[in-house]
Each structure stands twice: as structure tokens, then as C-alpha cells.
Amino acid sequence: MEGAAATSTSARSNSANNNASSSNGNAASSSRKFTIKPFRSYTQMELIERHAKTLVEMEGSGFSSILKVVASSPAVGSVAAASASGRLMMASPARGALGMGAGSRGMLGGMEPSENGVVIDRDRIADLAAMYDLFSRVPSSVNHLRDALSERIRLDGRALVRDQETNVAPPAAFVKGVLDMRERFAAVVSDAMRGEKKGQKRMREAFEDFLNADARAANCLAVYVDELLRVGLRGAEERKVARELDRVIVIFRYLADKDVFEAYYKNHLAKRLLGNKSGSEEAERAMVSLLKAECGYQFTSKLEGMFNDMRISKETAEKYRSHKKGLVNTSTDARDAENGGKPVDVEVSVLSNSHWPSQNVQPCILPTAVKAAMDRFQKYYLTTYTGRKLSWQTFTGSAEIRATLPPIKGSKKSNARRHDLSVTTYQMCILVLFNTQDVLTLKQIRDETHIPEDELRRHLVSLCTPKHRILRKGSKGKGISGDDDTFTYNAEYTSKMTRVKIPMVSMRDATGSATGTAATSGANGIDGGAAAMGGAGAAASRGLVDGSSTVPIAVEEDRRHLLEAAIVRIMKARKILNHNDLVAEVTRQLSGRFAPQPQFVKKRVESLIEKEYLERDEGDRRVYRYIA
């Protein structure tokens, strides 16, 4: 019994010891819980925050250096991409043995082309993501990564701007560079920076910074869209069309000068519609719909009016053709003798003057046979639609003329050679003069046609190029020496093609500054609300120079009217408002078209005070009152 008691006592003692031990363990665990968090915070502070700037700026392996590599990934199909692919394949042959999918991915070393053909270095983005995850442990240090992202975008963007300024890259190439940049940096923000809102905001602000330095980006984007809709999307699938236009709209959102884009876009659209150069009418309408969704009905009302005018114009042309066929007794017009006694077949597009870009350019002197055809159409149109007036705009016309040339000397063929030349209205007027004379001076051609000086020189030089030397220029060099410079009919002109389109040279090549028998012809006219325009020769609206960094004069005038209208509208509703609040409200209302500078707003306010729409408060000169 004593032994048993002793045993029992011993057991209780051990149990007590175990309880004590367990109690001590809980205390130690609790102690560790209270020390690990401060220790971890201190460690992160020491290793991350204090060295964050160094980790970002470190040469070769820092966030900025890796970001630079991602930003400069070679384009798909380029020599740089091919050579990089070859080097990576030789350096890591083991990857190639993983099968077709893994092998091709290994060859590019993690560089994967997107749907738009932009190479994105996924391996480097994974490195950036690891660094972001590390920095996100100390949220304040992530600002260093955002700063590096913003600085990289600004540096690359300004480099693109410099290339465009120095004519290293044309306008369309500038926009292509911006689109590729945006896709790469969007991948960085969405994948490496986990799509954080602050990163997206810094990326947007960086793009807006260099794109809105002047009006260049709005201009270049319109040129890029023009090339896209003329050639780039011709025959493309609906999915590709939507994808490409969505990319354009992303850049469009960054623009402050949306009204500048509208002016250039309208100008290019007019040339595409009148010259029948649109690759796809569906793509054209899709682009207008996207712009309407972004900026509202007022932004696209004129663009939609242009499509409607073209539809009505085609119906009018059909009715006119039926009218001509229905004529029984047609009296001959002596003026048609210039065209071998046959009437010229003229096609006229009658367009609303308020929708289309136009300028007060005096009509040139047309050949008498063409003028007779235009008079016949005008008589029909004004009889059918009373109360209208046509104002012809010949600078946008085009024509086809048949050139009859003598046989080439020494050739076995004795028949006359024929070529159908597709030319502008101005070129038609010039060439028809050589039906009666073989040699003419610049002054003589100017007096006979009344074509504006710069356009006359440009169209003459286009007829004297080595490939299409229909006329021979007396002076040497690209330009025209002066009024006495001669132009001679070239009877030895040859071409393998029966139908020849004569391309236009740039204004710079023609002037040295930055800035046959008629078959069919096009012309322009404006009536108390209708403009007749045909072809797409010269620019439909002067003063718009592709690649220019300045705001066109016409856009500046529109801005003055818009700004004054907005000020009057706001003051009429508020009655009394101080200067700063007025500037803020005007800026908010007009942000969909352009960003008015405070000084510009002040000038327009002064103008409205002079016109007695507003007055200053007697007690506070910075407060304005609306005068009813």
C-alpha cells in the first residue's frame, strides 16, 4: 500500500511538472507573437524602404534598368527581333526540347508578340513583378516604382517627339511608336504592378504629359487613322478592325486638343470619301461611332452629315444620268468642239457646305468643254431643287484625260499611242493648254488658268517627274526658277500602263518650303446650304499641314467662339461668379474638345465685357456680373 501511494504521488508530481512546462510554452509562444511583428516591420524598413531608391536605380538589375529593357523590346519581324531570337535559341537549347509550344517560346526567351504584333518581354515583366511584390510590403516605397515608370514613359515619349520633329519618323510612325509603347507599359502595370489604380493613373499622366506638349500628337493621330482606314484595314476581319480602332481611341483619350484631331480627321475623311479611297465603309462608320461614344453627338454631327451627303449625292448623280438619257432633242453646244464635239461626262458631288471642310479659293479657269458640262448640270440641279445656289470648288476635283501621242521614233508600230491619265482638275487645266501650243512659260500658264501660285508650281512639278515626265521643264533641279521658266509638251512620253495615275509631289518639293481630251471631271460647288465637290486633288481645307505642331488658325477661331459661348451660358445661369470659379467651370465644360489656358479665358472675358455681355462688380474687380 505504501508503494502504491508513493507511485501515485510521483505521478501527480509529474503531471504538475507537465502542466508547468505547458504553461511556460504558452508564455513563450505568446512572447514570440508579440516580438515577430515589430521585428518583421523593422527588417522590412531596413532592407526595403531605406534601400528602395538604390534597388530602383541599380545599373543592370534595378527596376529602371529592367523597365528600359521591356520598353525597348524589338518589334516582331524586325532584324533585331530575329537576331535576338537566334542568340537566345543557341544559348538555351534545352528549352527547345520541351515540344513545339515550349520550344518556340524558348526561342524568344520569354518575348511574346501580342495580338497587335508588339513584342512583350514576359521574363523581364516577371522580374518587375517580383520586385513590386517585395516593395509592396512597405507601401510607401512603391512610389519609387511609380516614379520610375512615369519617368521611363516620359523619356521614351520625348524621344519619339524629337524623331518626329526632325523628320526621322513620319506622323504615322510616331503614332505607331506611341501605340507600341502604351501596350508594353500597360502590360507592366497590369501584370507586374498587379493592375493597381495608382500605377494606371501615373501611366496616364505620363502619356498625357508628352502627347499634349503641342498639337503634334492630335495631328499625327489623324494621319495614322487616315492611313489605317485607306490601306491598313482594307479587307481585314471585323475583329481586327475593332481591335485596331480601340487602340486608336485609347490614345485619343490622352489628347487635350481633341478639336485639332477633329479638324484634321474631317479633312482626311473628306479626301477619302470624295476620292473613293476608303478601304471599308464599315470601318469608317465604326470609327465615327467610337468618337461619338467618347465625345458626344456634337463632336461627330458633321462627320455623320458627310456620309449622309455622299449617299444623297449618289442618288442625285443617278437621277441626272437618267435625265440625260431621257432627253430627245439635245441641241449641240459649240463649246463641246474642244472635246471633238462630244459632251464631257461630268460627275458632281453636291454636298452641304456646313458639313464639309472648305475654303474661299477662287475657281480656276476650266476648259470650255468642261465648263459647258458643268453649266448643263447646274441648270438641271437648280431647276430640280429651287432656292439653292451652287458654288464650284474646283481645287478638289479630279479628271481623266486621254493623251494621244505620236509613234516612238524608230518603232515598227505606226499607230498613235494612247494613255488615259488620271489627274487633278488643276493638272487637267494645264495639260489641255498644250493642245494648241507646245511650249508655255510659268507666267502664261498662270494667266490662262488662274491657279493659285503654290498649287500651280506643285502641279507643274508633278507633271515633270522622271517617272511621269509628260512635260519637260526648262530649268534644272526640282523647283521652278521663275515666271520665264518654260514647260514643253513631251511627245516621247512612254508608260507600260494604258491607264496612268499621276501622283502629286509634296508642297515642300515643289516650292522649297515646308508648308489631251477631257473625258470625265469633278468639281465643287456651294449653294445656300449645298456644296458640290468632286475628286480629291488638293487638300480639302488649307492651312492644315500634316505633322505640324501648331494649332490651325481655323481651330483657333472656333475656340474663341466656343469659349465665349460657354462663358455667356455659365454667367446667364449663375448671374454672379468670381474669376477662378468661372475659369474652373469653363475648363470643365470644354474639356471634351480642348483645355483652355487661363490667359485665353481672361482675354475672352475682356472681349465679352467690351461687348457688354458682362460687367465687373464695383466692390470686387475679380467678380463678374451677367448683363441681361
Image: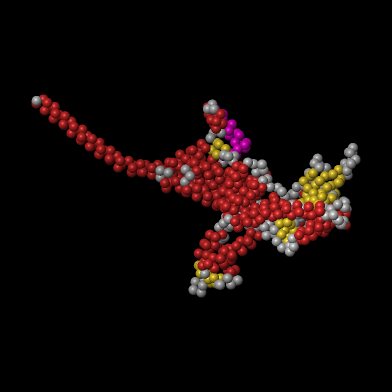
Q: Locate residue 499, reporting x and y percent.
A: 79, 44
Q: Quadrant of residue 20?
A: top left
Q: Residue at x 78, y 49 (%)?
A: 423
122 in magenta: no
Residue 349, position in %: x, y?
74, 54
Task: Please give left or right for residue 533 compared with residue 417 in the image.
Answer: left
Residue closest to the eye, 579 or 480: 579
How many numbered marks have been drawn onto this rendered protein structure?
A: 0
- Nearest the viewer among 77 and 304 is 304
Residue 552 seen in the figure: yes
Residue 183 against residue 523 in the figure, above or below = above
* Predominant SS of the magenta segment: helix
Q: Residue at x 61, y 34 (%)?
A: 82
- Would you say 441 lies left or right of 307 here? right
x, y percentage for residue 456? 78, 55
Name above or below for residue 75 compared with residue 248.
Answer: above
Determine the residue positioned at 56% across, 72% down: 628
Q: Quadrant of residue 394?
A: bottom right
Q: Looking at the image, which is closer to me, 406 or 231?
A: 231
Quarter that holds the N terminus: top left
Q: Residue at x 48, y 44 (%)?
A: 195
Residue 341 placed where, x, y %? Answer: 88, 53
Taking depth in this image into account, of 568 and 254 the one nearest to the observer is: 568
Residue 483 shows up from this direction: no
The reply to whether the magenta stretch includes residue 92 is: yes
Q: Which residues are magenta?
A: 73-93
